[in-house]
Image: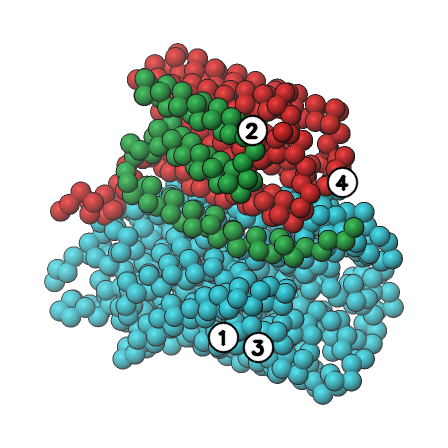
Amino acid sequence: MSFLSRYIFSTNHKTIGIQYFVLALTAALLGTALSVLMRLHLTYPEAKIRLFEILWPNAAAGGVMTPELYLSLMTMHGTIMVFFVLTTVPQGGFGNFFLPLQIGAEDMAFPRINMLSFWATALAFLVLCSAFVVEGGAPLAGWTAYPPLSAVGSIAGPGMGKGMTLWVVSIALFCAASLMGAINFITTILEMRTRGMSLFRMPLTCWAWLVTALISLFAFAVLFAAGILLLLDREAGTSFFLPAGLVINDRILDRKGGSPLLWQHLFWFFGHPEVYIAILPGMGVVSTVLSVFSRKPVFGYRAMVWAMLAIGFLGFLVWGHHMFISGMSPYSSLAFSVLTLAIGVPSAVKTFNWLGTILGGRLHLETAMLWALAFVSVFVTGGLSGIALGQPALDMYFHDTYFVVGHFHIIMGVAAVFSILAGTFYWWPKMTGRMLSETLGRVHFYVTFLGVYAVFIPMHFAGIVGNPRRYSDFGQFEFLKDVQGLHKFITHAAFLTAAVQLLFIFNLIWSLYRGKKAGDNPWNATTLEWLPPSHQPHIVVRGAYDYSVPGARRDFLMQNESNGQ
Amino acid sequence: MTRNETTWEGGGSPFAIGAKPLGMWLFVVSDALTFSTMLMVYTYSRLANPHWPAPFAFSPSIVQATVMTFVLLSSSLTMVWAVDAMKRDDRRKTVQYLSATMFLGIVFIVIHMREWVHLINDEHITLTANPWNQPLFGATFFGLTGLHMAHVTIGVVYLGIVALGTRMGKFKTDHVETSGLYWHFVDLVWMFIFPMVYLMSVKR
Amino acid sequence: MKNATGIWALLLGLTLAEVALAYPSLAPAVFLLVLLALSVGKSALIIAFFMHLRFASRALTLALFPILIALILLLLGFLPDAQRVMHAA
């Protein structure tokens, strides 16, 4: 096998999993760097910062960011983080590497489509990043790309020309890649399970990947159509999202007939399920990690499965809660609100089952376990502010304030990232054969855990004051004078949290060379990926979480192990 | 142990179809939602613009579109025959029926292009403008039929590859069956586009 | 094979019926419902006989279609907003 077919255009699921992981790590570093630059500008809007000038000689001439540059950084931060980190690692990265191992399959069902899916994702990322260097720079429309401004081209501002077009193309490519991935995951799970691996013996990670793939299969189909239409509006002169009578930058547009609300419907029909695409795989990882490090079976395995299916379906019914202030009928608002709050039920089922899993267990507080516990913590915190936002009366006020920013960063960003980190610490020995440093891991964990709360909880208070999001400078608003100190605190906490991530990167690299060698099954876990590699197919005889089985010869029984003495 | 328990227990295919057809079924379901979205955008646009034009005359538009529907339905029939022949392991017949399907697909594209040219040249309907000053009429029409035609074109190429692979003996029944699912789906989508786009806008 | 030809003839007939119904000037809403019903019937025939779903396991039908149909119906939730578009000249 040549170098190319082995490491670059590989069809092996493990290689593809690692490729996704590395791509997403790159994206995460870029996205974090962008957020640091944004906070720097927000806190010191007048300061002349040499770094800005070096990076953007035009848009930050003299070292001061223009508001447009700030918006473009925000757009890219959001898009990179949502699509290329949160959607990519938990499913493409961990899923590809571990799904076939966990269900005892040799590879994914369609290895070549799998490779194509990764390279389409990588290409989408390159196309998106190229928006930074084209004329006008990156788009300003945010990750939701609301028309009319996203649909009219460069008269809407720098970056709304070529940059915005590249954004749409990138997202359309990403849709195609995700669709291929979803088909692969579902087929693999349904067709490739080894003998004895019934659906209800699968680890919850596999269930989570299955539900996530089902959501992707449908959600990205809608976004793809929306992307085509937006591209037509931009490049072919149609007006799907453009009403009559638009005046933009003192120019009258001669388009008519369309509706920007239509985009909001289409986007959020995808966008809300997308939230669950990001978080469900993490729920699977956390369920497993909590069980392994408590040496107890997952509490209420079947309830966990049904809760995931319920969350997956309900996620499609609530897109309207992103549009409460669009002027929709209050009756629709009420329906969307009730359905939104209903998602709290399966979410609570999961939370109580996680607590039930650790209750009375023999807890081993390894770093992976710490991240899983922290996930439960942020999931509850972020979920509670979601209940506030899910009510139209409150959302009228909170909409487009920092309350929303704090909410979705905790529930979607931080929770999903914590589950990714739990997965990384848990599976790294299998992926590389080496253990990560526990000492570095703990320092990284405690600083990050406290850091994210220090960053995002104060944002809720800023939102209650009425602090709007997406502004590049709050200096000129009298009513925001009082939150300036809060923002300074947030910025410094964010710098600390971002800096400590370097420790994590160092830990990854260090362990590749110096990490303790891991055995086949360092955590004494039960699922099939921890068996030594073998060419015999495994025959599964029990469920995925048989820890501390009474009368067994040790405190765990692997899935292919009968209960002999 | 009942049959149901064994099929879902792993080590087999619960739906009793291969991985390839199942993968294509999943694609079809997803693509169906993409087309549904496009049709919903069309419906939305129509509701939002009360003076929607109804320009399709019986001849040539409705006649051509009806003929196109017949052509596409017939291509589905030859596709069914191709799959049947492949199941009997009659590769020569399979390739013949696949070629017939491709031919009908190309006929569909040709008539459709004629129809587009007629609308653009004679009726002055383009993607962005038309005589009734309802720009979304052309946008939805060309958007929907264009997306469908792209599917037909891809389908013709896809069937060509399958025919070639079948002839060289490389492809198995699964391959032909899978391409059949795709082709029938493209046919099925037209069963919605034809009435909703053409028949809802006939010139009376 | 005979079976498929029969289905094909039925599909052609239904298509002709749709075209014929376009000319008595039915109320648009009624006509749309009739067309949709006929189209759903036609696609059901295609799915069941041409795509062989009738001869596949019931589980496959149940796995593929209920969710799809539910989601398509959900898309109808967009439509009330179509009336709220700005109608400037």
Whether residue A26 can be seen here = no
Residue at the location (75% across, 71% down)? A472
Numbered disc in front, either 2 or 3 = 2
Q: Which chain is red?
A: B
Is residue C52 shown left or right of residue B42? left
Discs 1, 3: same chain? yes
Kind of residue at badge 2: Tyr
Badge 1 element:
helix
**Distance from Cα at disc 2 to Cα at disc 3:** 52 Å
Q: Are marks 2 and 4 on the same chain?
A: no
Q: Residue C34, position in %: x, y?
A: 47, 37
Q: Quadrant of residue A406?
A: bottom right
Residue, disc 3: A394
- Which mark, residue A387? 1
Tell me the kind of residue under disc 1. Ile
Mark 2–mark 1 distance (CA, rounded to whole Å): 53 Å
Q: Are discs 2 and 1 both within one chain?
A: no
Q: Is residue C20 above or below residue A153?
A: above
